[in-house]
Image (cartoon, helix red, strand yellow):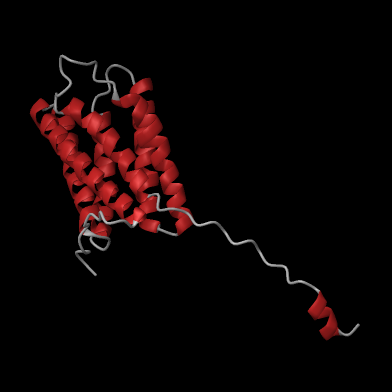
Amino acid sequence: MSVSEDREVTPAVQAAPSPGIADPGPLGLAAFALTTFLLSAVNAHWTSGNSAGTAFLGYALAYGGIVQLLAGMWEFRRGNVFASTAFSSYGGFWIGLFVWIRVAPAATGHDLGWILLAFAIFNTYMLLMATQVNLAVFLVFLTLELTEIFLAIGNFSSSAGLSQFGGYLGLVTALVAWYTSAAGVSAGIGGKIQLPVGKPLIS
């Protein structure tokens, strides 16, 4: 049998095509939004007198933490550096916050202020990079930046008023994140209902 004949009868070995991965962004945003809403309701004093103010804890671990971290890992698989960094980092934030609240001593000083300050620094360059994504994502990071700054200052100054205002900003952040998540779901469905997200501020 000649070489040419051998090539004709030997089937080519081809790798199986990798399955497509749906956009995990809407899931990550939904997880972030819900957990942020629950915690911000506590900071805004909405839960005072009607609950223990700990409803967010389980969801900080399971939804805001683990689910958002998974969304970040799927974004890595899709090659989206911005979204994978954002979701994985804030998934870690919620898991870390859950662990910190569970193990921290009664007198924590300004520990939470330092945590918020550190994430505000991280959020600053993510906010800058978000100008190249779209308006909706930029507004998520903008409102989150303000939330973290006011909560950090409120913690360092022991100001209940500033912390409460930070809680209200957090509620706005959650609503913006929910909207952006819904816009991602509508885009993924590709149906008649499409929610605008705006153009990038810098393109």
Q: Is residue 11 left or right of residue 146?
A: right
Q: Is residue 72 left or right of residue 107?
A: right
Q: Residue furthest left?
A: 161
Count of numbered circles in the view: 0
Q: Is residue 12 above or below residue 71?
A: below
**Most foreground residue, 73 or 154:** 73
> Which quadrant is the C terminus positioned in?
bottom left
> Which quadrant is the N terminus positioned in?
bottom right
Horizontal and vertical percent for residue 59? 35, 29
Horizontal and vertical percent for residue 180? 25, 49
Q: Is residue 153 something one can see in this rendering?
A: no
Q: Residue furthest right?
A: 1
Which image quadrant for residue 96?
A: top left
Q: Is residue 78 above or below residue 40?
A: below
Horizontal and vertical percent for residue 109? 24, 24
Q: Is residue 25 left or right of residue 79?
A: left
**Most foreground residue, 61 or 10:** 10
Which image quadrant for residue 198?
A: bottom left
Horizontal and vertical percent for residue 170? 19, 37
Instruction: Give the residue at x 45% y 54%.
Output: 76
Instruction: Give the residue at x 24% y 20%.
Output: 53
Instruction: Give the residue at x 22% y 16%.
Output: 51
Instruction: Give the residue at x 40% y 53%.
Output: 23
Q: Residue furthest front?
A: 192
Q: Is residue 17 something one can see in this rendering?
A: yes
**Most foreground residue, 137 or 4:** 4
Q: Is residue 105 above or below residue 192?
A: above
